[in-house]
Image (cartoon, helix red, strand yellow):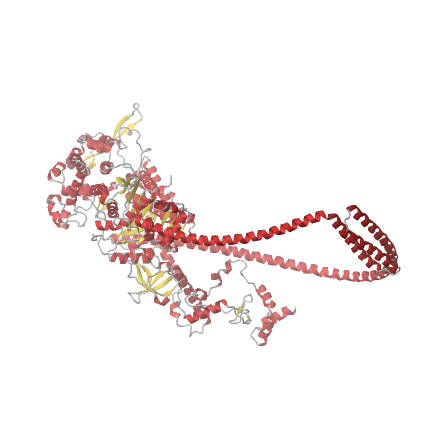
Amino acid sequence: MDDGKPVWAPHPTDGFQLGRIIDISADSLTIEPLNQRGKNFQASVNQVFPAEDDVSKHVEDNCSLMYLNEATLLNNVRVRYSKDKIYTFVANILIAVNPYFEIPKLYSPETIKQYRGRSLGTLPPHVYAIADKAYRDMKVLKMSQSIVVSGESGAGKTENTKFVLRYRNYRKQLFFFCHWILANPLLEAFGNAKTVRNNNSSRFGKFVEIHFNEKNAVVGGFVSHYLLEKSRICTQGQEERNYHIFYRLCAGAPEDIKEKFHLSSPDCFRYLSRGCKRYFSTKDSDKLIPQNRKSPEHLKAGPLKDPLLDDHADFNRMCVAMKKIGLGDTEKFNMFRVVAGVLHLGNIDFEEAGSTSGGCVLKKTCGQSLEFCAELLGLDEEDLRVSLTTRVMHTTAGGAKGTAIKVPLKVEQASSARDALAKAIYSRLFDHVVTRINQCFPFDSSSHFIGVLDIAGFEYFEHNSFEQFCINYCNEKLQQFFNERILKEEQELYQREGLGVNEVHYVDNQDCIDLVEAKLVGILDILDEENRLPQPSDQHFTDTIHSKHKDHFRLTVPRKSKLTVHRNVRDDEGFIIRHFAGAVCYETTQFVEKNNDALHTSLASLVSESKDKFIGELFENSNHSKDTKQKAGKLSFISVGNKFKTQLNILLEKLHSTGSSFVRCVKPNLKMVSHQFEGAQILSQLQCSGMVSVLDLMQGGFPSRAPFHELYNMYKQYMPAKLTRLDPRLFCKALFKALGLNENDYKFGLTKVFFRPGKFAEFDQIMKSDPDHLAELVKRVNKWLICSRWKKVQWCALSVIKLKNKMLYRAKACIQMQKTVRMWLCKRKHKPRIDGLVKACNLKKRIEKLNEVVSGLKEGKQEMSKHMQELDSSISAHIFKIKNTVMSRIDIDHEHQALVTRSQELLSVMQKKKQEEEEMERLRRIQEEMERERKRREEEEQKRKQEEEERRLKSEMELKRKHEEEERKKREEDERRLQEEMELQLQEEREQEAARQTVLEQERRDRELALRIAQSEAELIPEETPVEAGLRRYLRASEPSKWHTFRYLPSTLCNIELLAACREEFHRRLKVYHAWKSKNKKRNAQDEQRAPKAVTDYGKKWRWVSAKRVRMKCKLDTVDRNNFLCGPDKYICDTSVFVLIGKDDMEMCELSLEETGLTRKRGAEILSRQFEEIWEHYGGIQYLKIAIESRQARPTYATAMLQSMLK
């Protein structure tokens, strides 16, 4: 196929593999892998893409590829990753692949210097380029900027955030970065933890703001944090750890602190013993950790290895950082003391009380833990014991304040209260850490800021809970922001500016967001409503969700999952949400508990009234303080979910108010090792991040732009006085002409100029502010203006010549006007004489007519002629007298009246004689007329009889015509009704097909995500999705899979039906192939030429010259009398058709009647009656006679036709 050119076909592990097309089926192509000859497989037409001629080459911007599709994008990232080039552009979006090792000099100060002041495209892709772009946009546009760093856990978001901050604060503005670098170990210690997919995963989101003054100098910073994972404090997965601070305190704390805080190995603490109990350390640092601080698991398996983590050394670095950012020894001691207190709090355990009260008591073995916890947190030991095992309830009776009643707690309730207290203490300690970090940043008046968002990426595990639900909800909102900012708003801007860019469609996830946050029926509101019930339960909450969203596309039950572990979850224990990245199963156990992090009254009062000042400060601004204690309750509590939604909306408002840049971080493999590229899961990340839709938009888009007035203002101060009068748009046009930019690389809108992707170097050349460079540009602008003005002078000369010709034309018109006026004056002066002459001339003409009457007289002709001559002589004398003498109007009128009287007398005499002659003639004519009248009446009588006969015949014909017309209208109505039914059926089929494709796409994403989960958890997925199974059954039922076995048989077969079937199947497959080829054609490439030049030239000549020779047409009868076949080379007035292989392939494919679309077009049908009329009009009877004589027509048909014509 197509000379065996390679294509990219889907592969389960590599994402795509090279192959070639060897056969075409209904909806799929048969691919033969290039590296595995003979192992053919089927692939969907929509998942096969053309490959570059050289698949080993790589480009810095994916928009520079010949073919823009997801396969070439993945291959380009793969090739660059193999060469340790981890950054790649997609227009102005950066793709960053985590290398899992340090690349030499990639982030060195020398590299920072190279990228400073350089725009995208001038240097290789780098996160520094994005940072510099954000700074320059803020500087030029006077608008705050945001850099959104997104990706899965372990993709390198946090590290790229550090590099952005390092770049922006290099050299003169180093102080902010120094404070951030010092504070970052403290923030990571309290907010990062080891997970299955990332050893240093940020379990909170942060938005770091760098503020600038009007002179674009750094004046301060601020850190906002979102959604700390509180549940990790109490529980972790088997291969996961709690927050780093717990392990670093146990491993690196000095002996005196260890003794004061009663620290030991991680396996001695409940909050650490449920997960991984090993430290991160090197071979040398592991020796510095005392043996009594190591867990048996650590002693047996050894330390955890990570080049960036070392618990013992990191504790020392954290202590140094705390000191340098301004935390004193006392405050540092207090923070460590609270951390140790949380550990000992977790060791408090409960058992059922022996009394009938139904409460619980502390286990006897936990007395020491209770003592240590109370000591470290500054609480009374007995008060802590009572508050953990009972809670206080206030009744309405007993006065204004009611009566306080102590209610014993069950073992489960006491354990939940203990964990809630630990979460509350640690979360407020984390808030305090962030507050102290913000206080270490010097801050002055701010004009603009650059914000860097680093938040947990899309998460999916075997067991997903409330934390994953909130994180994925956040990622849905960020994905929508990405779609709106990059896809929706970009296309709306193109439309407003009139650029004419084709629309790009993308998947809108608004329905998924509404499922979570909609009022009353959203999952968050349903969860809050469940928390307000007297006896909330996770099962009731889950049932409510399924009942209110029974038919929602994004929500389904766990038993429909691809993973066995999820199918074992009951319907009232979880639900599945189809996110933009794939389907995730959430287990709703503890959803209600985790949504309400409020402490009950006893514990809230206990910690707020602590004797320890530090603990009191942590809780003084909480919702459980004395001022707000009485307002708290089930009906007024602020849930974790709604609190997070509010924070997220504030963040998105801030992002919408700023300019945006995006860094898409990619995790290359699940093992987190270097130089291992797992194509399938990387492809899934690229698809979920919207990179494929961005490729489609950037293929014809303009990602860079600048308003006209801003370019004008930048250069105004360097322009001479004669150039300052230019309009901003005209100046930009002159500037681009002076630079010699290609007109295809930019486009003028209504208010802005736009640039193509990959043309940032030209854009930067204009935006530079180097005075020498600006002066040179001004010279070029001046030169272009001189040339344009010279052209205007030429046009002006032409206009002057045109004006001269117009003036000559007007002068000629003036002369004509003078002539007309003079003529009018003369007429007014000589009007009496002119009127007399006119009357005399008219009288003379009248005499001439009288002479004609005289000539017609039979008697007295000579006498009357003599009188007429005398009168004519008198008129001539009157005219002569008027011309040669000056006469008054009265004299002229008097003489004229005398002449008129004489003429009237002569006229009366002639009339009398004429009447006598006419009377005689009239009598003769009357007699003749009477004779003619008699004959006329006889003829009319005969004609009337004929007309009556004709009317009778016409009435009969009209009745027959009306009957035929009614039959025709009835037939047309039936045809119209059938056509409408067919169109409705086709529309329903199209809608069903579109819905089926949407479901298939979602199922494909769900299956890919399930495969990634299965790979990480070593689980197999034996069964396929019902939709895929149904699709394959449909293909097996409708696809003749054995057609390829008949490929070489048609030339030897005699079975007509089989030959026709082979022919139809061949053309169907050919259409499928050429449709795929047209969809994936090269960009900016001309049509391929596959025919010799001589043949092409010959084809061009015949394509435009109509055939002079008229070929004949014969009509052949078929079994169906309503259909007729036209034999080859016998079309009447048919023009020769010349087609080229490789260019007109689709025109050579035979189409069935349904495929042509004519059946859906009203009036396109040709009925047998219409065919007969045209056939007879063009003399078909002659060809029919010839066919009868040569015995080419059936006798029955020929006889029927001859009989119909004889009638």
In the displayed orientation, state which residue is furthest to the bottom.
Answer: 1190
**Residue 877 falls left or right of residue 1188:** right
Residue 854 locus on image (x, y percent): 84, 59
Q: Quadrant of the C terminus?
A: bottom right
Residue 1141, position as x, y percentages in the image: 42, 68
Q: Nearer the viewer, residue 505 or 789?
A: 789
Confirm whether residue 1 shows in the render: no
Task: Give the total number of marks visible in the rendering.
Answer: 0
Residue 734 x/y as whole percent: 39, 51
Compared to residue 27, the image places residue 427 above or below, namely above
Q: Quadrant of residue 745?
A: bottom left
Residue 187, by quadrant, is top left
Q: Nearer the viewer, residue 25 or 219?
A: 219
Residue at x-position 17% and y-position 50%: 305
Front residue of 904 and 445: 904
Q: Identify which residue is drawn at 55% across, 65% down.
A: 1122
Camera sees residue 532: yes
Q: Nearer the viewer, residue 479 or 896?
A: 896
Judged from this view, the residue extending furthest toward the top is: 399
Residue 629 vertical position relative to residue 267 in the rendered view, above or below: above
Q: What x and y, as percent, mark residue 891?
A: 80, 47
Quarter in which the N terminus is drawn: bottom left
Tell whether 438 sits left or right of 1097.
left
Residue at 60% over, 74% down:
1185
